Image (spheres, rainbow, N blue to C red):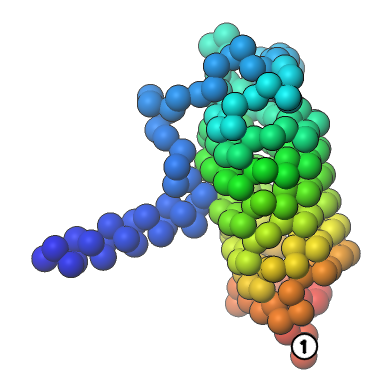
Amino acid sequence: MKSLKALILSLFILSLTALGVVGCIEPKTYEATPNEYFTFTELADGSYSVKAKDVTNLPEKLYIPEEYNGNSISQIDAKGFMSATIIELCLPSNVKVVGANAFNDCKNLSRIYFNKGLVEIGVGAFYGCTALEELNLPSSLVTIGERAFVSLAIRRLDLPEKVQTIGVSAFEYCTKLNSVYIGHNVREIGENAFNGISESAEFEISASNAYYRLDENGKPVKQ
């Protein structure tokens, strides 16, 4: 009985990992980084975007607040945390968009917790985050921008089933990347999206994907 319970618990943890939510805490106990580290901008819909007040003065573990002035934080500003020395990042489920170059050149960033709710990762958002070895993208994600994840140290990539667009050079020069799963909704893979990854990389495409197939070399091509 104990072994069965352990197996069930292991499967539960694995399922959470696949959604990229392990490590992010339920909202009632979510210990966000204090507001003093951020600048907030009100958006047209009443929600807020956020950026660092000073990227040189951030804690190593950065937990983005869920709300400001009683309204949700829905967006990370373009270049909002560029070149920060953070090691760990957690985004709450309120965040829908990570702006262009938001965490570009965060070379020490080695762990990201994405919560379900994120829809778009912008151009160059995590470009040059060379310490990042694991990438568990949330099941809500639809769009991955151009050059979003260039030069990461990831070895495996499982794209969530809702992803539709993978931008130009999105995973370029992820030289250790050797396993890629492409879900059934992907309809656009930009030029050089996987250029410079491991030469022995293996691709798998959902059998229900109507837009792409594997060619004779095992690489994704348009149907």
Seen from the viewer's position, the closer of residues 12 and 87 is 87
Q: Is residue 214 visible?
A: no
Residue 183: x and y in percent read: 62, 65
| Mark 1, residue position | 217
Q: Residue at x 74, y 74 (%)?
A: 198
Seen from the viewer's position, the closer of residues 123 and 126 is 126
Mark 1 surroundings within 10 Å by alpha-carbon count, few (fewer than 14), some (14 through 19), many (20 or more): few
Q: Outermost residue, bottom direction?
A: 216
The secondary element bearing badge 1 is classed as loop
Residue 82: x and y in percent read: 78, 33
| Placement of 202 over or under 41, stated as above or below | below
Q: Residue at x 88, y 64 (%)?
A: 191
Seen from the viewer's position, the closer of residues 15 and 119 is 15
| Placement of 192 over or under 22, stated as above or below | below
Q: Outermost residue, left direction?
A: 1
Q: Outermost residue, top direction?
A: 69
Identify the image quadrant of residue 203. bottom right
Q: Residue at x 55, y 16 (%)?
A: 34
Q: Is residue 81 visible?
A: yes
Identified by mark 1, the residue type is Asn
